[in-house]
Image: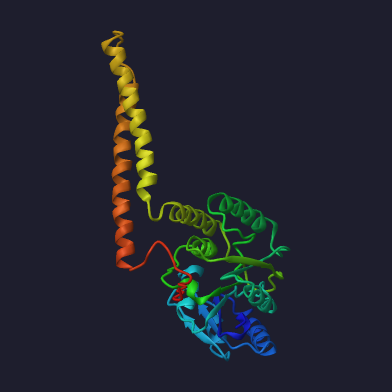
Amino acid sequence: MKASDKKISIVVPIYNEGENIENLHKEIVSVVRTNKLDAEIIFIDDGSDDNTVEIAKKLTPLKLIVFRRNFGQTAAMDAGIKAVNGEIIVTMDGDLQNDPNDILALLNKMDEGFDIVSGWRKNRKDPFMKKFLSRGADKLRKIFINDQISDSGCSLKVYKAECFRGVDLYGEMHRFIPAILRIKGFKIGEVVVNHRSRVAGVTKYNYKRLAKGLLDLVGVWFWRKYANRPLHLFGGIGAIMSFIGIALLVWMAVEKIFLGGAIGNRIWPIIGVLFLILGIQFFVSGVIADIAVKTYYTTKKETVYLIRDIIENKRL
């Protein structure tokens, strides 16, 4: 069965988009009806303080989730994804910059064997500074996690619903969903999509979100590399530091005992002891992290692997 023939859930986080959501809803409904899609539309209001909720309540068909306060786009995305009934999940922004007409192209790309298809805003219609910061963040993302897509910041994506089983989103993690799912073994493709200029409202992108995103980038990098073996990272750092500390202390002892050097007024013994203590602390931290990770997988009843198929040929 083609992706476009399956039940589709269109998830849209919104925040102070009162001037945009009516037109956005109209465009989504038009795309659904024109292409005869079996789709539900879910808007998640992230604590708007304008007339967004009042306008959204009048729209139909629509499932509206309203937060008590502003929790952030990632939380809104998580709430929307957990509320879907479809086999395919489409995510997009609520500012009208994503074009709903591109949904079918992403669904068709999924039929080539992809679990996730990401939109690529090849010709972005954003201010220079926003594009500059995003490109810098993209460079760091490729160095640390390399999710093999050109535009992780594009919210217009389609996913198989099974991708999110056991996945919880937090922080600014919505930018790294493809990276998280690639870690789990899902296959990612991308399609060039139309990107439109913002016609109303103001961008929610700022330096605070950039800083949070960079911290979450480090978190995803750690999870990708050392999620099931944190002792390798912390223990490795601890071993190196302990070796440096022991080497310094041995050298100071050699100077004192065999060369008759004065070491009481030198800083190297203190540095040696410091490195040795830090090395031990890193190693202990690795052991604690290793226990925590094992506890995490045990309590969530989650494994470090995902099985795509089990094929059993019984004939000899």
Q: Position of residue 308 (x, y in %)?
A: 48, 70
Which residue occupies the extreme front position in the image?
316
Q: Quadrant of residue 301?
A: bottom left
- 160 above or below 177? below
**Whether residue 183 can be seen here:** yes
Residue sitting nearer the eye, 169 or 293: 293
**Whether residue 263 can be seen here:** no
Left or right, 5 with respect to 87, comes to right
Which residue occupies the extreme right position in the image?
123
Quadrant assignment for the C terminus: bottom left
- 171 above or below 288? below
Quadrant assignment for the N terminus: bottom right
- 310 above or below 256? below
| Residue drawn at point x = 30 percent, y = 15 percent | 254
| Residue drawn at point x = 62 percent, y = 73 percent | 110
| Residue drawn at point x = 60 percent, y = 80 percent | 3
Q: Position of residue 204 (x, y in %)?
A: 57, 66
- Which coloring applies here? rainbow
Q: Position of residue 205 (x, y in %)?
A: 58, 63
Which residue occupies the extreme top position in the image?
260
Residue sitting nearer the eye, 308 or 40: 308
Q: Quadrant of residue 82?
A: bottom left
Q: Quadrant of residue 51?
A: bottom right
Q: Position of residue 149 (x, y in %)?
A: 62, 60
Q: Count the marks: how many?
A: 0
Left or right, 33 with respect to 90, comes to right
Left or right, 297 with respect to 67, comes to left
